[in-house]
Amino acid sequence: MTPSAFLTEAKCVLHKSEFIYFCTKCHVLICGKCVTTEHKGHDITDIKTVADNYRRSAEGNISDLKVAVTKLSKVVGQMKEIEKPTIKRTSDSAVAEVDASVKKITDIVSFKKENTLYEVQNQLDIEIEEFQYDLKNKERMYEHQNNICESLQRLVHVSHDITFITSYETLKRDIHDISDLVGERGHEQMYKFDKKGFVQEVVNAIVSNFEMCLVGKEDGSVVLTHKTDIKKKEKE
């Protein structure tokens, strides 16, 4: 601070007179008129005595402040050199741990997804294969029975009885009961996606990979607990 910062008005604001005393009761500088007015009856002393006392007090403040400032300087240095880098390392470590956890969870979900999709595709392939087999069988039966029907339609118009009987006996052997084929196709879907089971498997895999387990509470809620904590409780 420059010396000009310490310059103050050397006169009494009320009476426009120079300060000549110090009021020990009010702890303010006063002029001669103040003694008989605002500070009448107060204990007063000369300015020099007060200044000397204040200087001794200031020297004590300086000594105490130097000790405090030295200690604070060490604290500031420690914060910059040790604590700040530690905070940075801790922050970087936390971010890396979050990224690693997210990657592990993502990998688990992706693995379960691929397995489930593979299972779905296999089941669908089986369904398609069975459908194609059933379709071809019905198409073959349709063509065969339709040909017999057309032959019978032509045969009924044959007037020669012996020819009719002989031909009918031959065709009749190829007529099959197709009533079970013409009804509504009773098809039950072989594979249905078990969403609840899928989510449960994913959750179990995630919990297991993080060496945790799900523990049910009395209120019906479920919390995650480290396996090491459970082993400690079991030992206790």
Image (cartoon, rainbow, N blue to C red):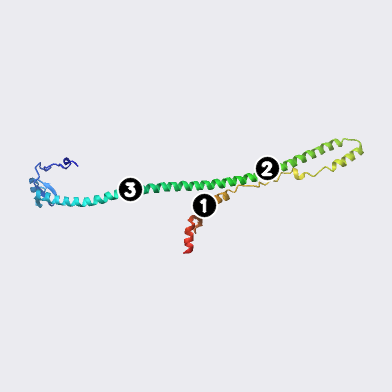
Going by the image, does 160 lie left or right of 209?
right
Q: Work out whether residue 101 or residue 139 is closer to the camera in this orientation and state it.
A: 101
Q: Position of residue 198 (x, y in %)?
A: 57, 49
Assign a secondary structure to mark 1. helix
- 137 w.r.t. 25: above or below: above
Give the alpha-carbon distance from disc 3 to disc 2, as whole Å: 70 Å
Q: Work out whether residue 59 or residue 124 is closer to the camera in this orientation and state it.
A: 59
Assign a secondary structure to mark 3. helix
Where does label 3 land, which residue? Answer: 81
Quarter of the rendering occupied by the N terminus: top left
Assign a secondary structure to mark 2. helix
The residue at the point 32 percent across, 49 percent down is 79
The answer to whether the residues at label 1 and label 3 have Cβ atoms under 8 Å apart is no
Where does label 2 land, which residue? Answer: 128
Q: Position of residue 16 (x, y in %)?
A: 10, 41
Residue type of the residue flagged with mark 1: Asn
- 106 w.r.t. 147: above or below: below
Count residues near mark 3 (Cα–Cα under 10 Å), then give few for <14, some for 14-19, many for 20+. few
The residue at the point 77 percent across, 44 percent down is 179
Going by the image, does 225 lie left or right of 45?
right
Going by the image, does 21 lie left or right of 68?
left
The residue at the point 23 percent across, 52 percent down is 67
Residue type of the residue flagged with mark 3: Glu
Mark 3 or 2, nearer chain start: 3
Give the alpha-carbon distance from disc 2 to disc 1, as whole Å: 37 Å
Of the residues tagged 3 and 2, which is closer to the observer?
3
Q: Position of residue 116 (x, y in %)?
A: 59, 47
Q: Position of residue 58 (x, y in %)?
A: 17, 50
Going by the image, does 214 lie left or right of 69?
right
Give the alpha-carbon distance from disc 1 to disc 3, as whole Å: 38 Å
Q: What number is the disc on residue 209? A: 1
Is residue 132 at least partly visible in the picture? yes
